[in-house]
């Protein structure tokens, strides 16, 4: 299997293990690799070191939050030229994160202001901001990298998908669209999946999303169809180890009558095709 979404220490908040410890867990469980995600820094160097040391396909990228300069073409260019494969639009600094009361760096350091990031059409952008967004998209297209929606709103996800298509991006992932943010409807998810977007469901949602059930996640899986991506989004001290989290997600969805071989492919073939093929 190949997990497209996992967190590890070092990080600004506690994690269940350091990079090498998490990587050892994946190796022991027979995974082919994983995508290392950080909300506050590029993970490319850390991922490259793990890949060289272990032979696993460990992939890094960058989330376009305030420590990266926001939606910053320079940060994206540096990430892609150094071998990064995944670009997340704002997560911890998305305006949805603030409005939903989800964790932010400013929670840890009150001297930081609580300004947030957005993309059109929810908040108007001037020509300079739009230019930065379009350049980021062009860079992703040129490197054939993966564009993830992060924690943008549903309207922003739809806008970003349309812009990505216009600018030649082939690898587009809706980051846990049924999570608290962006809280997309089944109909919205099905529409974007039918138009070519990959759709992520995470094990994190089982343990930590208020009101979420395995039955609801099964509805999302059906809406995604052959564009389904299953990941752990694990690494929290109060979650299972990431490989076990992803395996349990598959088991829980299978208990809802979903085909086990399809679910296995959604945690192996589909994510490898999205990120590496």
Image: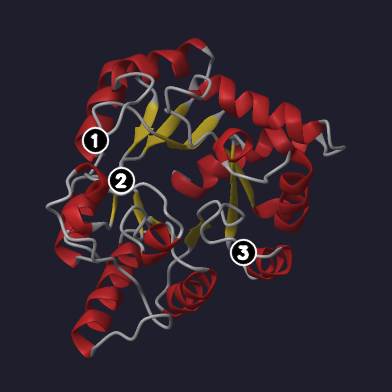
Which of the numbered marks, if any, corresponds to residue 184? Answer: 3
Q: Residue at x 74, y 30 (%)?
A: 252
Q: Is residue 234 above or below residue 182?
A: above
The one nearer the camera, 176 or 273, is 176
Which of the numbered marks, if any, corresponds to residue 193? Answer: none
The one nearer the camera, 85 or 157, is 157
Query: Do the CB atoms of the residues marked 2 and 1 lie less than 8 Å apart?
Result: yes
Query: Do the CB atoms of the residues marked 3 and 2 lie less than 8 Å apart?
Result: no
Q: CA distance from mark 3 to mark 2?
A: 21 Å
Q: Residue furthest bottom?
A: 127
Q: Position of residue 117 (x, y in %)?
A: 30, 68
Q: CA distance from mark 3 to mark 1?
A: 28 Å
Q: Residue at x 30, y 77 (%)?
A: 134
Callout 3 secondary element: loop
Is 3 on the left-hand or right-hand side of 203? left
The residue wearing badge 1 is 12
The residue wearing badge 2 is 39
Q: Residue at x 78, y 51 (%)?
A: 219
Crowd around label 1: few <14 · some 14–19 · many ≥20 (10 Å): few
């Amino acid at each position: 299997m190949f997990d497209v979404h996992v967190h590890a220490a070092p990080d600004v908040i506690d994690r269940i293990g350091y990079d090498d410890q998490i990587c050892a867990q994946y190796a022991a469980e027979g995974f082919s690799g994983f995508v290392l995600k950080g909300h506050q820094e590029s993970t490319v160097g850390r991922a490259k070191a793990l890949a060289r040391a272990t032979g696993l396909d460990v992939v890094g990228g960058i989330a376009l939050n305030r420590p990266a300069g926001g939606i910053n073409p320079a940060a994206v260019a540096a990430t892609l030229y150094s071998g990064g494969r995944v670009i997340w639009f704002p997560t911890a600094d998305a305006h949805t994160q603030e409005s939903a009361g989800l964790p932010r760096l400013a929670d840890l350091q009150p001297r930081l202001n609580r300004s947030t990031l957005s993309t059109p059409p929810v908040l108007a952008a001037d020509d300079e901001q739009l230019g930065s967004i379009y350049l980021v998209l062009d860079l992703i297209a040129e490197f054939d990298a993966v564009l993830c929606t992060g924690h943008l709103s549903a309207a922003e996800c739809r806008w970003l998908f349309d812009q990505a298509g216009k600018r030649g991006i082939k690898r587009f992932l809706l980051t846990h669209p049924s999570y608290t943010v962006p809280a997309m409807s089944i109909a919205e998810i099905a529409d974007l999946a039918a138009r070519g977007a990959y759709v992520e469901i995470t094990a994190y949602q089982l343990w930590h999303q208020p009101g979420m059930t395995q039955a609801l996640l099964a509805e999302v899986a059906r809406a995604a169809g052959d564009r389904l991506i299953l990941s752990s989004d694990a690494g929290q001290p109060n979650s299972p180890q990431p490989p076990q989290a992803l395996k349990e997600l598959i088991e829980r969805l299978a208990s809802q009558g979903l085909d086990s071989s399809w679910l296995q492919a959604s945690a192996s073939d589909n994510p490898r095709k999205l990120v590496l093929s």
